Image (cartoon, helix red, strand yellow):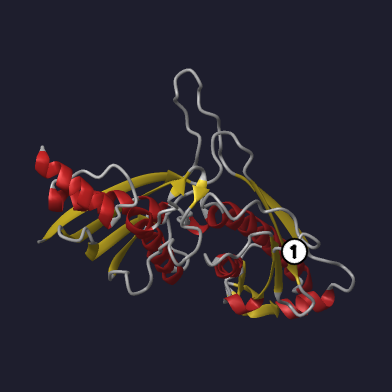
Amino acid sequence: MKKRGIGYGCTFYGTGYGNGFPDVSVAEAELNSDGKINVYVGATECGQGSDTIMRQIAAESFGSSVEIINYYSTDTDIMKDSGTAAASRQTYNTGNALRLASEKLKDRVIEKAKDLLNLNTTVGLKIENGEVFLNSFKATKISLSEIASSLGDEKLREEATFVAHSTEMDEETGQGCPYWPYTFGAAAVEVEVDTETGKVDIIRAASAQDVGRAINPELVEGQMDGGFAMGYGYAVFEDLNLKNGKIVNNRFTNYLIPTAMDMPELEKIIIEDPESTGPYGAKGIGEPVMTYVAPAILNAIYDATGVRMTEIPVTPERLLKALKESETK
């Protein structure tokens, strides 16, 4: 017999290392000789899209498209430490450091433009699309390449450091504010359980994620798809099968993970509530998008069968055993 059920899971999640651990990112921005902007960050691209996001953050500071940005990352010979690609921290932490470095460089570029345009103040000067111009009289302008050419041997390069909020919990009371910011999310899942085989299929699913501000909505959706797949595998597929301290399922022929064919159509809902301390309002969502999936699936199995599974993954063998035990009670 096939039975259907619906389940929900929700989460709140702190960005960064937390609990007083130093959480520091450093970034640099420089005006290149051709008028483009060189940015240097230690954020490691591991498929989450940090290379794209960092370009967008720097480009936003200069009111330009990403084509103006020369991006350099993950080379300790030419850049300083941005911390690990972990703890859902790179967009928030390193993005903030890069925003600050870019804004410091922008101020220096505008100051240089003021001198070259023979103005008595920087008031009213703006940067957009590779030019500095007087907003009240746009014919008064100079390109970034002209500014770069005027520098000679002088370098316009700025560095900024961002230190995230992170305080230790009170050991006596267990109270405190170990992280900032927090992000919030939820998932809803409908499953179909075959009570004769123990197989669990997801019929439909939805995830809703607070992202602060989505700097790149397409990448956010990619993170949500990936997080759902990982949560799905955690709940139903992935079993190390430890016996006497040894991993029995030590290869992908027996350590199963969801494939594209296993994935349901996921409705993705991006919740935007800009975070005042984030780079242009953004928060990190790398890990949070996974955390609510397994609870939602297990709650849906309970709704379908009346059996509360307390061990994961919910393999067909475990579920059939639990169903049989429930019948004898």
Which quarter of the image is occupied by the C terminus? top left
Q: Which of 61 and 297 is in front in this view?
A: 297
Q: In this view, does 71 lie to the left or right of 128?
A: right
Above or below for 141 versus 288: below
The residue closer to the viewer here, 156 or 73, is 73
Q: Is residue 171 above or below residue 235?
A: above
Residue tagged by mark 1? 75
Q: Which residue is drawn at 43% across and 51% down?
A: 241
Percent x, y of residue 184 = 36, 49
Instruction: State which quadrant residue 73 falls in.
Output: bottom right
110 with respect to 325 (left or right): right
Quarter of the image where the N terminus is located:
bottom left
Dot 1 falls on a residue whose secondary structure is: loop
- Does 130 appear above or below 53? below
Which amino acid lies under the numbered mark 1 shown in the image of this protein? Asp
* Residue 150 visible in the snapshot: yes
Examine the rendering and report whether any part of residue 129 can be seen.
Answer: no
What residue sits 40% from the left and 59% below the top?
230
Q: How many marks?
A: 1
Say left or right for 207 vs 217. Answer: left
Q: Residue 154 at x, y = what percent?
A: 87, 67
